[in-house]
Image (spheres, rainbow, N blue to C red):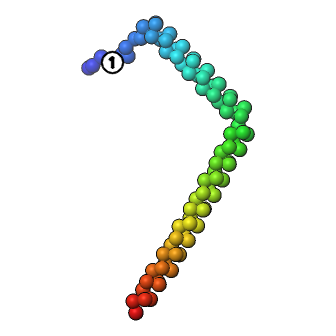
C-alpha cells in the first residue's frame, strides 16, 4: 500500500504574506461594495439612461434599414418594368 500524500508545509513568512494579502483584498472589495451601495441610485439612473439610448439607436437603425429596403424594392420594380 502507498503512503498518503501530505501537502507541503508553507513557511511562516509565506503564510503571513498570504494572510495579509487576503486581508487587503477583502478590505478593498468591501470598500468597493460599500461605495457602490452608497451611490446605487445614481448608478441606476446612468444605467437606465444608457439602456434607453441604446434601445433608441437600435430602433432608429431598424427604421433606416426598413426604409432602405423599401427604396430598394421600389427601384428594383422600376428597373424590371422598363424591360417589358
Q: Position of residue 11 (x, y in %)?
A: 42, 8
The residue tagged 1 is 4
Q: Say above or below: 10 vs 78.
A: above
**Farthest top residue in view:** 12
Question: In which quadrant is the N terminus drawn?
Answer: top left
Q: Position of residue 29 (x, y in %)?
A: 60, 26
Q: Position of residue 26 (x, y in %)?
A: 58, 22
Question: In which quadrant is the C terminus drawn?
Answer: bottom left
Left or right of residue 78, residue 28 in this image: right
Q: Residue at x 27, y 19 (%)?
A: 2
Tell me the SS state at disc 1. Answer: loop
Total marks in image: 1
Left or right of residue 31, residue 73 in this image: left
Q: Residue at x 45, y 10 (%)?
A: 14
Nearer the observer, 61 or 8: 61
Q: Say above or below: 4 vs 64.
A: above
Q: Residue at x 50, y 10 (%)?
A: 16
**Farthest left residue in view:** 1
Q: Position of residue 51 (x, y in %)?
A: 63, 51
Left or right of residue 7, residue 25 in this image: right
Amino acid at each position: 500500500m502507498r503512503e498518503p500524500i501530505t501537502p507541503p508545509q508553507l513557511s511562516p513568512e509565506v503564510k503571513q504574506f498570504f494572510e495579509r494579502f487576503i486581508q487587503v483584498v477583502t478590505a478593498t472589495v468591501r470598500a468597493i461594495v460599500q461605495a457602490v451601495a452608497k451611490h446605487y441610485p445614481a448608478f441606476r439612473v446612468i444605467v437606465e439612461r444608457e439602456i434607453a439610448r441604446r434601445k433608441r439607436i437600435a430602433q432608429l437603425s431598424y427604421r433606416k434599414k426598413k426604409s432602405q429596403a423599401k427604396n430598394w424594392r421600389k427601384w428594383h420594380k422600376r428597373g424590371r418594368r422598363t424591360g417589358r
